[in-house]
């Protein structure tokens, strides 16, 4: 994968996650009929103020890493191969955990098939894809 394509995909993942955060805010305030209801966006594991704060922090982190990756300089570019390996392993475990979460939801809530209440799962997969893209960076020595 080329450097340019990887950077574009990093930003696409970031923008998709931003869309998710903004859409949930929109649903929480205005309840538009063209978006799924609140329950579809929110699993309830964290109270919404803490969830929103964590999402905004994640978005800021993603943006900083993306800028560093695009420019080729900064703290998030100097990772050693061993660190990239662990980031990749984390990304793979993250994807597998979301696939398992989806399978369990479908098994335990057959009335929700196929997409009912799965918005958080899909956007966790977006985050996992972003992690895997970060781990694909080639070091100058490689």
Image: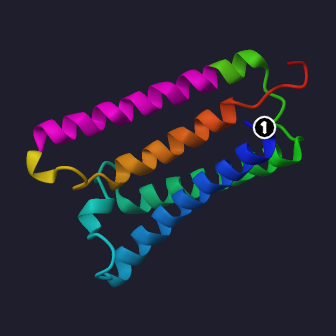
Q: Nearer the viewer, residue 129 or 5?
A: 5
Q: Which residue is mark 1?
A: 76
Q: Nearer the viewer, residue 81 or 4?
A: 4
Q: Is residue 139 left or right of residue 26?
A: right
Hey, which quadrant is residue 139 in on the image?
A: top right
Q: Quadrant of the C terminus?
A: top right
Q: Nearer the viewer, residue 51 or 88?
A: 88
Q: Is residue 95 magenta?
A: yes
Image: magenta residue range: 86-109
From the top left corner, tell me how far across and down residue 68 is, in percent.
82, 45
Q: Is residue 66 above or below residue 53?
A: above
Measuring 47% from the left and 61% from the top, which residue is drawn there?
Answer: 52
- Please identify the residue farthest to the front as the structure is shown: 1
Measuring 37% from the left and 30% from the top, which residue is drawn there?
Answer: 97
Q: Quadrant of the N terminus?
A: top right
Which secondary structure, mark 1?
loop
Structure colour scheme: rainbow
Neighbor class of circle 1 (other Cα within 10 Å; few <14, some 14-19, many 20+) is some
Hey, which quadrant is residue 30 in on the image?
A: bottom left
- Please identify the residue farthest to the top as the structure is shown: 82
From the top left corner, tell me how far across and down residue 109 is, in percent.
12, 45
Q: Is residue 49 left or right of residue 101?
A: right
- Please identify the residue farthest to the left as the structure is shown: 111
- The overriding secondary structure of the stretch rendered in magenta is helix
């Amino acid at each position: 994968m080329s450097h340019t394509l990887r950077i574009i995909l990093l930003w696409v993942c970031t923008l998709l996650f931003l869309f998710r955060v903004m859409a949930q805010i929109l649903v929480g305030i205005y309840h538009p009929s063209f978006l799924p209801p609140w329950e579809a966006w929110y699993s309830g594991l964290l109270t919404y103020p803490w969830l929103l704060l964590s999402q905004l922090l994640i978005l800021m982190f993603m943006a900083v890493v993306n800028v560093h990756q695009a420019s080729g300089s900064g703290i998030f570019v100097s990772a050693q191969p061993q660190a990239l390996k662990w980031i990749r392993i984390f990304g793979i475990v993250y994807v597998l955990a979301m696939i398992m979460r989806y399978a369990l939801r479908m098994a335990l809530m057959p009335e929700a098939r196929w997409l009912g209440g799965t918005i958080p799962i899909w956007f966790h997969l977006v985050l996992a894809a972003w992690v895997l893209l970060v781990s694909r960076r080639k070091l100058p020595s490689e």
